[in-house]
Amino acid sequence: MSSQTQLKPTRRSRFALRWYVWLLLVLAAAYALAFAMHWDDRGVLWLQERFESQAEQKDSIWLPDYRVVIDAKPLTGMEKDEASDLSYNPQTKTLFSVMGKNPFLAELTLQGEVLRKMPLVGWSNPEGLTVMENGLMAIVDERQHMLSIVKVDADTRELNIADFPKYDLGPSKDQNKAFEAITWDSHNQQLLLGEERPPALFTWKSDGSQILKGDKQKLASDELDIRNLSALEIDPRTRHTLVLSADSHLLLELDEKGEQVSFMTLLGGFNGLKNTIPRAEGVTMDEAGTLYMVSEPNLFYRFEKQQ
């Protein structure tokens, strides 16, 4: 009788200890996930957003007001490709996208219909694209650590890298996660470049032609609390920068000083999304403020701001 009485507390103690250890492991895993995804930073920014005035919201892109209107539309004929970036052309009122797995440039309608596909001969892994001026586009090849500036018009059917000027982007801290993002800053006449991991921003001066001036310059990136940097875009109206992170499932808005203004999570159930965007790799915006995204392998999204 005495021995049985002594055994019961021991079993309870062991059970309680196991439960306690299991709880600690769960809490540690949850904290690690929250830290990796920067949920603590998102929480702080979410609180800051609550105190932004209507005037401040009006002067920004203000991502919380956007809702998806075209959700995960497959790009026809690109099922085996990897949509890597997206850029809006204000002259043609169309979108251009680069595919990284099988290098080619595609022109799309604003509803995600494929108009044409142009093979990119000589490129290895085109990951970044931006429309500049006068029919020029800049393409970043992550594997070759190279930037090229090409000319595209209505008659273009193929592009050969040997026909265009190329610029060495130099070494990166992680050569396998190097330069991936690019956008044209018409106001400051420069290209804005982004390294994937660790996330970093650079500028490279240009007059809008195929000639770049000097060398790229690194910017302070203290506000880039994201796991990786997938794409960049500059809003022509506010001159704010959009930073896309596939790993963080996040679109972040930075003002002209590089400070965080607003964000949009790309998880299912938010901003009208039915499901999480699998791997968002490209983002762009038109002059009306409509947002467009592409995700690997071939998904198209369109977001509009709700009043």
Image (cartoon, rainbow, N blue to C red):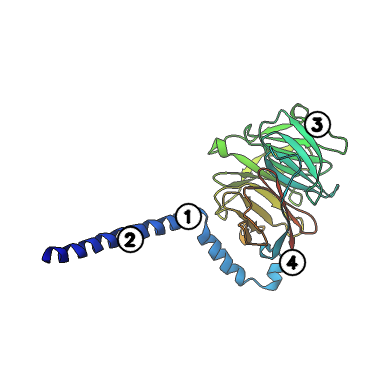
- Which numbered disc, 1 or 3, marks the residue that appears first in the sequence? 1
**For this rendering, which residue is in front, 31 or 186?**
31
Please give left or right for residue 119 compared with residue 195 in the image: right
Q: CA distance from mark 3 to mark 2?
A: 63 Å
Furthest-front residue in view? 1
Disc 1 secondary structure class: helix
> What kind of residue is marked 3?
Glu
Are the residues at dot 3 and dot 2 in contact (C-beta closer than 8 Å)? no
Q: Which residue is mark 1?
A: 33
Front: mark 2 or 4: 2
Q: Is residue 193 visible?
A: yes
Disc on res. 306? 4
Please give left or right for residue 8 compared with residue 26 in the image: left
Total numbered labels: 4
Are the residues at dot 2 and dot 4 in contact (C-beta closer than 8 Å)? no
- Which numbered disc, 2 or 1, marks the residue that appears first in the sequence? 2
> What kind of residue is marked 4?
Gln
Disc 2 secondary structure class: helix
Q: Which residue is mark 2?
A: 19
Coordinates of residue 19 in the picture (x, y in percent): 33, 60
- Which numbered disc, 3 or 2, marks the residue that appears first in the sequence? 2
Disc 4 secondary structure class: loop
Coordinates of residue 67 in the picture (x, y in percent): 71, 62
> What kind of residue is marked 2?
Trp
Q: CA distance from mark 4 to mark 1?
A: 32 Å
- Which numbered disc, 4 or 1, marks the residue that appears first in the sequence? 1
- Which numbered disc, 2 or 4, marks the residue that appears first in the sequence? 2
Disc on res. 158? 3
Are the residues at dot 3 and dot 4 in contact (C-beta closer than 8 Å)? no
